[in-house]
Image: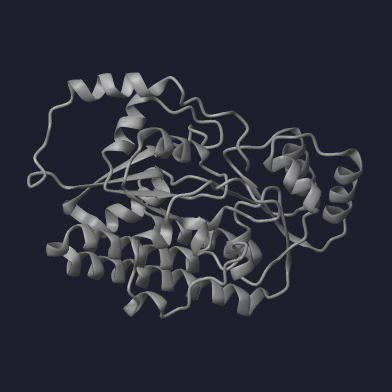
Amino acid sequence: MTSRVPVSIAVLGAAAVALAGCATPVGEDDRALTVVASTSVYGSLAAAIGGESVEVVSIIDSLSQDPHSYEASARDQLTVADADLILENGGGYDAFIDALIDASGTDATVLTAVEYSHDYPENDGHADDEHADDEHAEDDHDHGDHEHIEGFNEHVWYDPHTIAHLIEDIAHELGELDAGNAETYKANAAELVAGIQGLEASLAQIAADHEGEKIFVTEPVPVYLAAAAGLVDATPTAFSEAVEEGQDVAPATLLDARGILESGSIRAVVTNAQTGGAETKEIVSLAEKQGIPVVEVTELLPEGLDYVAWMQENIDALAGTLTR
């Protein structure tokens, strides 16, 4: 989704200074590295890689919070100002973190997930072996303006391949900041990437069994995952874009969507459990009448799950639905 509510930062500076005045200074040698993530999706990756040597703060850490409309606080600005490494999605998804970075004046390294996607405009993506031996320069990932890009699906955390590259760079940057634990970060990242490879194997199995089958996705959140599973998103673009941006779906588009569901070619409907309006409810109701299974996914990490377990649950739900 694109940002629907402006992020209010102008009044945070003075309040952040006041909070800083109340904080207890921590010696550089005594504190763990601090990683600040825009959402718990990226925070969970940092926690898995950093372990006990890293303190992770996820600004959005609940399914009840909406990154698109989140209004940052002075405490959030202070948190960002104190970060050693910042992880964001980019692509307009978490604009609040961009505003916090700009307002705080932080000099922390910023890793932006969308920049690791092969689909990112003017980006050829990262070669599979690129991160093993290449020299990494911090300015390779300079923070910039990451506005919503028309036609680009910013929900890249649903693309395990993209996330694998991000994981490698998180480990690299932590190792640059804390050379004494660099090998541990690298080993933890390798274990996490092995889990990602398991996800890709599960997706490949779905593709082997269901290549080319059609699904209807009310929002483009899980489209990368579906594409990796060899599935075809048959949703009218105008429908998913309208739902994603919180706009009314045009009557002609809704009629088109109904026709697709009634055609008998749709194997599953996938919805975003965190959002959705009247049109989404209508699609779900029609799917149920047509006997089409409905799968719910979320944008944010459910409580009690790490990234790999979460994605595996989504993959298993999709595979189970397709075999009905």
Question: Can residue 61 be seen in the rendering of this structure?
Answer: no
| Percent of width and height locating residue 93 | 55, 44
The answer to which image quadrant residue 178 occupies is bottom left
The answer to which image quadrant residue 320 occupies is bottom right
Question: Can residue 41 be seen in the rendering of this structure?
Answer: yes
The residue that appears at 52% across and 34% down in the rendered structure is: 66
Q: How is the image coloured?
A: one colour
The residue that appears at 40% across and 39% down in the rendered structure is: 101
Vertical placement of 193 versus 81: above or below? below
Vertical placement of 107 versus 262: above or below? above
Point out the image quarter for the C terminus: bottom right
| Percent of width and height locating residue 176 | 23, 62
Vertical placement of 62 versus 47: above or below? above
**Left or right, 64 with reference to 210:** left
- In front of the other: 168 or 242: 168
- In front of the other: 196 or 152: 152
**Left or right, 199 with reference to 146:** left
- In front of the other: 324 or 139: 139
| Percent of width and height locating residue 78 | 30, 31
Vertical placement of 137 versus 80: above or below? below
The residue that appears at 30% across and 71% down in the rendered structure is: 190
The residue that appears at 44% across and 50% down in the rendered structure is: 143
**Left or right, 61 with reference to 239:** left
| Percent of width and height locating residue 270 | 66, 52
Point out the image quarter for the N terminus: top right
* Numbered marks: total: 0
